[in-house]
Amino acid sequence: MAQDFAPLTNDLILRTARGEDVERAPIWIMRQAGRYLPEYHEAKGNRDFFECCRDPEVASTLTLQPIERFAGLLDASIIFSDILVVPQALGMVVEMVEKKGPHFPDPLTSPDDGQYSKVLNKNVDVAAELDYVYKAITLTRKKLKGRVPLIGFCGAPWTLFCYMVEGGGTKLFIQSKKWIYRHPEESKALLQKISEVCVEYLALQVKAGAQLIQVFDSWAGELSPSTFKKFSEPYLAYISENFPKRLAELGLERVPMIVFPKGANFALDSVCNLGYDVVGLDWQIDPAEAVKIRGNRRIVFQGNADPGVLYGTKEAITETVEEMVKGFGGGKKGWIANLGHGITPLVNPEDLRFYLQEIQRLTSR
Ligand SMILES: Cc1c2[nH]c(c1CCC(=O)O)Cc1[nH]c(c(CCC(=O)O)c1C)Cc1[nH]c(c(CCC(=O)O)c1C)Cc1[nH]c(c(C)c1CCC(=O)O)C2
C-alpha cells in the first residue's frame, strides 16, 4: 500500500466478511450519509450534488458525519459518492435534480443512436476520469484515523444500464425492457463495457484506500429469473472474477466483496455461488429462509430490516431487531447488520440510533 494509514482499531466487519467467529454482528447502514441528517444539508449548502462528490474535502466530511454522530455504533463507513459517476466516466451527462433524482439529458435510445457507439467505443481512462473519488477515499482514510474500515462501491452493470437507457429513475422500465427484448446482443455488449470499467474503478478505489467493496444492483428485482441469468448475473460474476485479478496485478491484497441484488431473492441460491464473500438481502426475505438457502456455503449475509421500521415506534424497532437477530442466528458469525435498503429521508436520526443500539444490545449477549 502506497499510503501510510493508521491501523484499524475496529476491524469487526472485515473479520465477519472473512467468515470468522466474532463477538457481535458488525453494523453499517446503506445511505448512512445523506438527506435524513441535518448536518448533511448544512455541509452541502446549495452546492450541486455531484459537485460534493467531486470535492474530496466535502465528500470526506459527509462520509464522516454518521461515523461521528453514531460513534461506537457504526462499524464501517462508505465513501460519499454515487453509482452514476460511472456513466459520467463513460461520457454521459448526468445531473442530480433537487427533490427529483438523477437525470440524463441524452440517454441511450437505441443501438443506432450515435451515443451508443460512442459510449461502447470510448477508451475510458478510469484512473483520470474518477480521480476525484480516489482522492476522496484517501483523504477519508486519513480522517478516519483507523476508527472503522472504509467501503468503496459501484453500481452493478444491470442497474447502471437501466439508468443509461431510461435517463433517470423509472417505475415501468420501458426502455430497459425494449433494449433487452429487442436488442439483446447490443445490450450485452454495453453491459460488458460497463463491467470492465467497474472492475478497474473498484480496483483503483482499493489502491486509494477502500478496505471492502460493494456492488449495488438496485434494479435486479425488475428482471425475471431467466433474464436475471442473462443480463445481470454474468456481469456480477465478471466483476467478482476479474476484480481480485486486477488487485493482484496492482500488487494489492484481496478485499472482501459484497453484492446487493435488490429484489432478486428468487435467485438467492445462485447469487450465493457468484464469487462474492457477502450477499446483501432486502427485507422481502425472511432471514431464516435465506440461512436455509445458504446451507453450509461460506457466504456472509448483510441486511435486512425494512427501512420503513424507522418510521415506527421503539417497540416496533425492538421487535424487528429481535426477529432479525434470531433469524440470522444471533450475530456471532455470518451476518453484517444493515437495513434491507438505504435509509430514507425524513427518518429521525435518533430513531436510527435506537435501531443501532438495539442491534448491538441483542447481538452482544
Ligand atoms: C440507485 C443508486 C443511486 N445511488 C446509489 C444507488 C444504489 C443504492 C440504492 O439502491 O439506493 C448509491 C449511493 N448514493 C449515495 C451513496 C453515498 C454513501 C452512503 O451510502 O452514505 C451511495 C452508496 C449518495 C446519494 N445519492 C443521492 C443522494 C441525495 C442527493 C440530495 O438530494 O442531496 C445522496 C446522499 C441521489 C441519488 N442517487 C441515485 C438516486 C436514485 C438518487 C436520488 C434519490 C435518492 O436520493 O435516493 C442513484
Image (cartoon, helix red, strand yellow):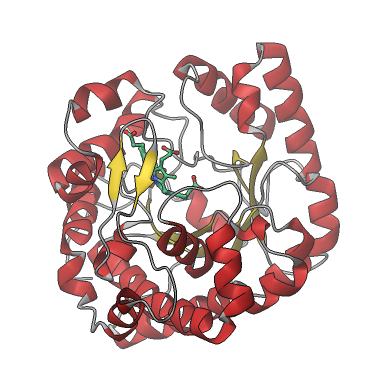
Quarter holding residue 47: top left
Q: Is residue 241 above or below residue 100?
A: below
Is 241 placed left or right of 204 in the picture?
right
Residue nearer the viewer, 270 or 25: 270
- Tell me if I can see residue 277 in this picture: no
Residue nearer the viewer, 234 or 273: 234
Q: Locate the N terminus and report the quarter of the image it occupies.
A: bottom left
Is 56 placed left or right of 189 in the picture?
left
- Tell me if I can see residue 1 in this picture: yes
Q: Residue at x 29, y 83 (%)?
A: 251
**Quarter of the rendered structure image containing ligand 1:** top left
Quarter holding residue 275: bottom right
Q: Locate the C terminus and report the quarter of the image it occupies.
A: top right
Q: Residue at x 17, y 61 (%)?
A: 4
Q: Position of residue 105 (x, y in %)?
A: 30, 54
Residue nearer the viewer, 98 or 86: 98
Q: Position of residue 108 (x, y in %)?
A: 39, 68
Residue nearer the viewer, 6 or 261: 261
Q: Position of residue 257 (x, y in %)?
A: 50, 65
Is 82 placed left or right of 5 in the picture?
right
Q: Is residue 284 above or below residue 127?
A: above
Q: Position of residue 238 (x, y in %)?
A: 52, 81
Q: Is residue 32 above or below residue 349?
A: below
Q: Residue at x 48, y 16 (%)?
A: 348
Label tally:
0
Quarter holding residue 51: top left
Is 172 placed left or right of 252 in the picture?
right
